[in-house]
Amino acid sequence: MFQKRVDFELFKSEICHRVKREGDIDFIINVLKDEEIAEYFEKKWHLESLYLLAMVDYLCRINNMPLISMFDELRQGKFKEIIYPASVLLYCSITKNEEYKEECLRCAIPEFLRHNIVEAEIRNVC
């Protein structure tokens, strides 16, 4: 786990690489064993905490596992503004067209979108 706070895009990339490296189930087990979600939340790193929770919830869903009930209260957390990937914001800025954001919202994984985080693909990592 990160000791020093890193850019959120780097954090997301590392989490996706961990999922690929560890596999879905071992990733979930390791996150829970190391209490990473709670640790980020205690540091007030809410973006990282909710992203990690969304990842765990998503992996639980696609692997037909129940949600971890200890996070029920934290699941209510939602950012006021939608958090888009930097690549989406850059594309919209370059093309001067905001419609791409709407397309990304439609394709977003529900567990992430619950917290107003747009994430559509976690498996496309090298």
Image (cartoon, helix red, strand yellow):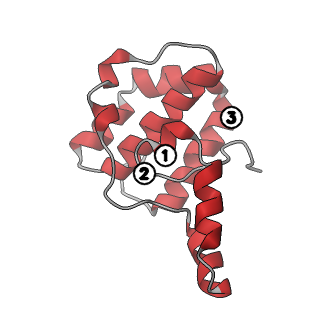
Which SS class for mark 3?
Answer: helix
Residue 53 lies, in percent from the top left, at 43, 35
Which SS class for mark 2?
Answer: loop
Residue type highlighted by circle 3: Arg
Q: In which quarter of the image is residue 88?
A: bottom right
Q: How many marks?
A: 3
> Which residue is rendered at x = 68% and y = 85% of the image?
95
Mark 2 crowdedness (10 Å alpha carbons): few <14, some 14-19, many ≥20: many
Question: Label 1, on which residue?
Answer: 113
Looking at the image, is 104 positioned above or below residue 107?
below
Q: Tell me the number on the disc at residue 21.
A: 3
Q: Is residue 113 visible?
A: yes
> Which residue is rendered at x = 38% and y = 42% of the image?
50
Mark 1 crowdedness (10 Å alpha carbons): few <14, some 14-19, many ≥20: many
Q: Quadrant of the N terminus?
A: top left
How many angstroms separate mark 3 from mark 2 (CA)? 27 Å
Question: Label 2, on which residue?
Answer: 116
Residue type highlighted by circle 2: Asn
Q: Quadrant of residue 10?
A: bottom right
Looking at the image, is 3 positioned above or below residue 71?
below
Image position of 25 (left or right of 32): right
Callout 3 touching callout 2 (CB < 8 Å): no
How many angstroms separate mark 1 from mark 2 (CA)? 5 Å
* Closer-to-camera residue (33/112): 112
Residue 27 lies, in percent from the top left, at 56, 27
Q: Is residue 1 visible?
A: no
Tell which circle, 1 or 3, labels the residue nearer the N-terminal end. 3
